[in-house]
Amino acid sequence: FGHIIAVKLASSGYMVPSQAKEMMTEEEEEVGSILQLASGIFQRYAEQSRLLHGHLVPPDQRIQDYLNDALKSTGELVKLPEHTLFLDSYGIARELSLPSDKNIHEFHNDQVSSYRISNGVMHNPQNDRRTTKGSFHIAEYGLPIPADKIAVPLLTYSRLLKAAFEPPSDINTLPYTSTWNNPIECMCSLFIRPLVCPEIPGVWPEKRLEMRFFVPGGCVSNLDFVESIFGNGGDPHLPENNAALDPEHWTGTTGCVVLAPHLRTLRKKDLGLPHMSEATDVQKATGMCWSSPTELYNKGKPFKITCRDIRGVMVTILADNYFGYCKKETKTQIGLAANIYGFAEEEHAGGALAFKTYSLGVRFDPKSSYISSNYRFSEAVKLLGDSVILHKDGYATNEKYPEIHIMPEDVAIDLNTQLATWRQGGSDRSLRVLPGHIYVHPSGYKIRLEKNPNTVNYKLVGTAAEGIFTHKPCTVSGGGKSEISKSLNDAVIHGPIYIGDFNKDMDEVESIVERDYSNSIKAELLATEQHSPGRKVLSDERSLGSVIKLLTVNEELYTDEHNNFVKKIPNHIRAIVFVLKRFYKASWGKDWRSHFQVDIVNGAPGHELKFDGRNLVGSYLRVGLEKEGTWRTYKLRQDFVSADKVQMEDDITASVVVPRQQISGLPEKEFDAHPCLKISQNCEWRLFQRPDEAIHPGFDKQTEKDMSSMGLMAANFKAIKKDEMLELTQTIGFFDRFTPEMQVHMKKASELDGFDLCSAKSRLWEGKPTKNPRYLQLRPDVANPIGRYVAELGSRLARKIPHDAPCNFPVGAVIGGRRNNPPDVLDGIKIRPLCVFNPIHYQEIPELFMDYVCSVTGKSPSTTGAGSEGALTKGPFNAIQATADLNNCVVSMILTQYGGFSSAAGWIGPNYRVDHDISLLIPEVWCRMMPEEREPAGLIKRCELEKIDDFEFEGRAVPASRLGYRITHNFIIKYFGRIFDNPSAVFTKEILKPEVQDLGVYVDGIENLVDAQRKSALLYFEDGTIEDACPPLKAVLHCMAYGHYNGKFIADPEIREMFTREELISSDWYQKRLLTKQLRDIEHWEKSTKILEDFVQKPGYSLEVNRLQIAERIETARKQLEWAKNPKYLDAINGTIGADPIHS
């Protein structure tokens, strides 16, 4: 980038120093030659720029036009900077964030400390996290200001904005030039195009907004951060980057963010705020006045302030350079664009596409029950077309990924021979099966070799063709957004399967296997069972899951005699029975003992169990910790392999809802319960990860791999010099626990001058290691594209979709995340408990939205506070009234008929800390459930969910029904029994019923939740936005605030009826949403048509008009305008969320 930066600076009129030729590197000499040769061109360019004084690039002109109109009542004119350093290529910002001299490894100013490390950069901002209390200010202009935000006079906003564009020298010096004799001071700018509405193939294209960032030169690292996440929109001077010339893909909205940490030194008086004697009561309460002339705005603490209106232009000032602000402000801008454009939702969500995966042992048989016989190799090859290479032996190989093979429908794979075999033309054919390769059956089922981490043994692993997209919206900080998409493998512990006295234990196993279970089920329940309870344990009529269920205590299903028998089975014996069932073959008959052995150790039988001469290895998983901190570790089923996952979301999500029939190529019967479906897409290329577990060397393997890879950007880690790094590499019990990748990185760093980092060492903040270390992780589906490709390939074959047609993955389940806490103290203030939820809850829409409105949480390492995070967890990031987002979400949930589930993170009751262990398990459970098993009505009917009722405690009513339904022992046995050997030991009565741990804490937690919900709801009455709530939401808010709505309680049928799909579709207010969307689309296409027609008339642009095919774009715009005006347009968009009217 040295050439590019030198040319950019020189062409902008800045002096780029030269040095003696003998002191130059080869690159510097080349740059010097370029600058010398092009000096005349640069001078001419600078003169042309002076002649264009007052000219702004198209997005800046749109922003300036908005500001001129919005601020005209103040009598003050604020101009966007005409001359900034445009960062129009990805990577320039990173290069500019450190001195040009590669021998200088650090840069410091008052806002950031930047370090050049061996595999990237580390930027440590002044503050280690966002503050969320009293930080969001809104100018008194345009749309109403929500009660949870601080209103600011427009004059004050105007003066803040003007000052924002005048940064002081100390933070305006470009780090790249900081060691030059004449360092350059300039502001830098960036153009980005974040996603707002995903594409629905064949229905409409994706939509994006346009955004501009302006930062002082010394804060250019923030632009490195922004473009690493959202990409670089290129040079806004060029017509191909003018969003208005591409109306098919533009929302019609424009955002602007100005980074100005220096504003924290400005005084209230100078900003035009009134003296306290002249202030209103609201201004006194919010600090928008002064008593002393020296008072600083917002007490000198970080804040953000924005100005916006219904036109969809928003200009925000950030008075802090913590990186999270820039990301969250982009999120805010996407949210505003989605609300104004319509159709789309911006969601605070995580999500994963999860495919159930099993150990197949040593053989794959195409006649297995999980393989459909309705697929043929010839059909698969036809579907895949030229994306595969056909081999003469009758199989095919993917052209892009040669490790992927499409196999014939009769293929069988035997690990003992390491061959895949099939018949072709009357002859046997074979292919050697290799590690790292994937063998795909024409049905889409995928088989691969996988090595056990603790042995030399391999096994065959099979993965289903279809997965489920588990969507985790409205998830509070620390609620598991990221964890839902992380592989369970990092958390799995492997170890031997032990046996006591071999002969004695095998005798006990035999007694269990041969036992008669005919009388195990209660007589009154026999009629409800589909299969005879007398089936033998090793019978083909019993699955492994059936045996696990049989040998698990179930007081509702089984007799006392059977339960007492099960209780006496030692855990290690139960595990051996399950291992036997896993490997048993009917051809063994009763001679199964001969397949198990132990070694002779010191002349006596050992205790590590072997199967057919191979060491048996068990897999164990931590599920929470006891109160004293000891791990709760449980054995996984012998056939369990963690689900194959594709990360779909992490934090900023763009979603759209459409009628099911508009999405082509869906799997048969998978979505029959959902008349409309949601398509969600990640808005980010890189994820701002907080690796909580990385402080334990070797535990978070993915983080250690990422942080030892090239291209890293990290924040809030300790800058370590080589001597200290050498000491770390020599610390036994510490260094040896790291993954090989991090060990190599640290050893290399211990030999290099300058600075580096270690994934387990965060920076000190206020004397302690920060709990908010961060790094940018390249999105896993981008870093490992073959994973997404294989997932799509399997589904494509299963649905019989051609290779060049879209393969869609709509949301299959909605499972939000809570962060629960026991009673605690934060900064001397008592924090009431929230640990009232068991691992998984389901709430019907009214109760669900009580939670969604409030989004209450305990402490989180990401922010400085605890309490409500605002509606849909977007309180700090929502620039308009929350009713717009909530209305959208209500309509979305009613249209789609998704069940509203949630999972627990943090604590379950005051005694069980679970961290993110439940979040990791959610996709594992859901992908192993059939579509009909996931539906709430069936779960309730089968007593797998239980309703929580109100009760009395010490003479007062406790509204426990707000918690909805929770999973039961039946749910645990049936669904977690597909994961664990002994699921009832994992999820005990104390975990399923937290009130058993401490009823007083349970009651206080519920009352805390209800209090928080009431306070959150009252804000909508305080600021008047209750009138903008759609009728169902209005009813919920009334019940939250006052306990009733028009005399009806939340459980009354009249209230429940408001949340039915039939009521929604027939309502006037839903029709108004559709009409609002139609009118906005008409306005968009009218404006776009005029902009395109005006562009054609611009002098000197004829070549560009032809190159960009503007005539075709005009024709498209006219057709879209004609269609939007058509009366049938409303019918076409029925089943979408339309657009919220947004009170103005």
Image: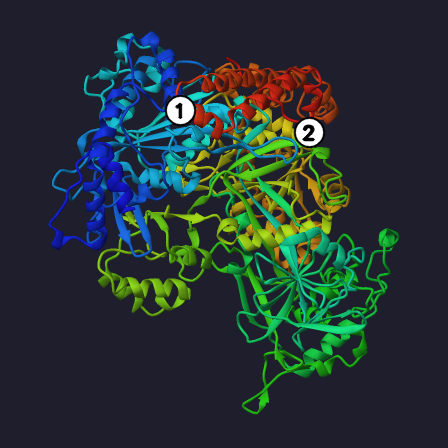
* 1121 and 929: which is toward the camera: 1121
Report the amino acid beneath label 2: Leu
Q: Amino acid at mark 1?
A: Pro
- State the CA–CA distance, disc 2 to disc 1: 36 Å
Q: Which of the 4 quarters of the picture holds residue 1069?
A: top right
Using the image as rendered, state which of residue 469 and residue 977 is in the foreground. 469
Foreground: disc 2 or disc 1: 1
Residue 210 appears in the picture as rendered: yes
Looking at the image, do the residues carrying marks 2 and 1 touch, with CB atoms under 8 Å apart?
Answer: no
The residue indicated by pointer 1 is: 59
**Above or below, 295 relative to 570:** above
In the rendered structure, the answer to whether residue 742 lies left or right of residue 125 reads: right
What secondary structure is marked by label 1? helix
Q: In this rendering, does residue 135 appear at all?
A: no
For residue 393, side relative to residue 162 (left or right): right
Q: Position of residue 62 (x, y in %)?
A: 40, 19
- Residue located at (44% from left, 28% from top): 210
Is residue 585 toward the left or the right of residue 187 in the image? right
Image location (x, y in percent) of residue 746: 32, 63
Q: How is the image coloured?
A: rainbow
**Residue in the foreground of this view, choosing between 1114 and 696:** 1114
- Name the disc covering residue 758, or none: none
Write the residue at 39% across / 39% down: 227
Q: Label 2: few (<14), some or many (≥20) within 10 Å? A: many
In this view, the residue farthest toward the bottom is: 603
Q: Is residue 488 above or below residue 891?
A: below
| Image location of residue 272, percent across then percent down | 26, 13
Residue holding disc 2: 895
Q: Quadrant of residue 1100?
A: top left
